[in-house]
Image: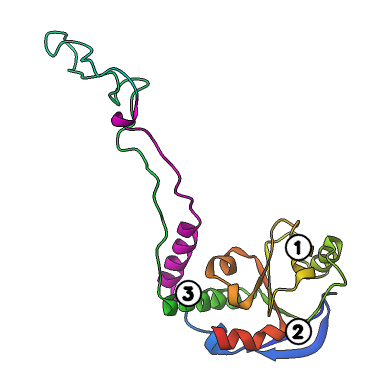
Amino acid sequence: MEIAVLNISGTDTGKKVVLNDAVFGIEPNDHAIYLAVKQYMANHRQGTHSSKERSDLSGSTRKIKRQKGTGTARAGDIKSPIFRGGARAFGPHPRDYHFKLNKKLKSIARLSALAYKIKDEAIFVLEDFNFDGPKTKNMVEMLKNLKTDNDKTLLVLNDINKNVYLSTRNLEGVRVVSVSDLNTYEILDAKKMFIVESSINTFEQLL
């Protein structure tokens, strides 16, 4: 599969790169994608939610009314969950939501996400570039030239470039990652994905 190489001005450089079908053209595995995204979101949960049960509340344990003869349901102490100000029944407690997936499945999920992006014609190849310094306006101008300033954008570099990274840090909806840090969720979450030309070979080696 051949794809044209663009520069940061948004124009075609006349060069083309060949994308390996074993990386960008596999048959997508939806279940692998589901598990990878589920793990990504679960691993980002803090799990600090907490509620108080009866043993955690301070209050009288006196039986508040007699057992029979009131015409209403029997009740114990004032900390019962059925009373206002009482404890929470079966409430959440701090827990760790992390779980593991094997490397092969995560790799299949990433390849499947890339395959969907290729089908949607949402993957573009950029000529290698660099900024003289960390300036947000340079990145804003580049995104306008690439016609993606209003879309969620994922920029994939061979290695993290400090000037490029700092130029995007204040921009909402723009994410810069290296090939080694790429994950399924970020691929799917982006409307458009730009891959730097020098990272194509790294893609094929790692994925």
Q: Position of residue 75 (x, y in %)?
A: 20, 18
Q: Residue furthest right?
A: 132
Instruction: Provide the residue designation for mark 1.
Output: 168
Image: 46 above or below 53: below
Asked which quadrant contains residue 11, the reply is: bottom right
Using residue 56 as the reference point, say whether residue 172 is left or right of it.
Answer: right
Q: Secondary structure at mark 3?
A: helix
Disc 3: which residue: 109
| Image vertical order of residue 21 relative to residue 50, above or below | below
Q: Is residue 176 magenta?
A: no
Q: Earlier in the sequence, mark 2 or mark 1?
A: 2
Q: CA distance from mark 2 to mark 1?
A: 22 Å
Give yes or no for contact between labels 2 and 1 (Cβ–Cβ under 8 Å).
no
Locate residue 107 relative to residue 63 in the image: left or right.
right
Q: CA distance from mark 3 to mark 2?
A: 26 Å
Residue 20, position in %: x, y? 59, 90
Q: Amino acid at mark 2?
A: Val
- Callout 2 secondary element: strand
Name which residue type carries label 1: Thr
In front of the other: 146 or 100: 100
- Residue drawn at x 34%, y 38% is 91
Q: Earlier in the sequence, mark 3 or mark 2?
A: 2
Q: What's the distance in space between the residues labelled 3 and 1, CA to CA?
A: 27 Å
Q: Could you say where residue 13 lies in the image, as x and y percent from the top left? A: 82, 85
In what quadrant of the picture does the C terminus appear? bottom right
First of labels 3, 1 by sequence position: 3
Q: Find disc 2 in the rendering and name its residue.
A: 5
Check if residue 35 falls in the magenta segment. yes
Q: Helix or strand or loop: what does disc 1 sit on?
A: helix
Q: Residue at x 45, y 57 (%)?
A: 42
In the rendered image, residue 93, in percent from the top left (x then y), is placed at 37, 43
Which of the two residues, 193 or 206, is positioned nearer the viewer here? 206
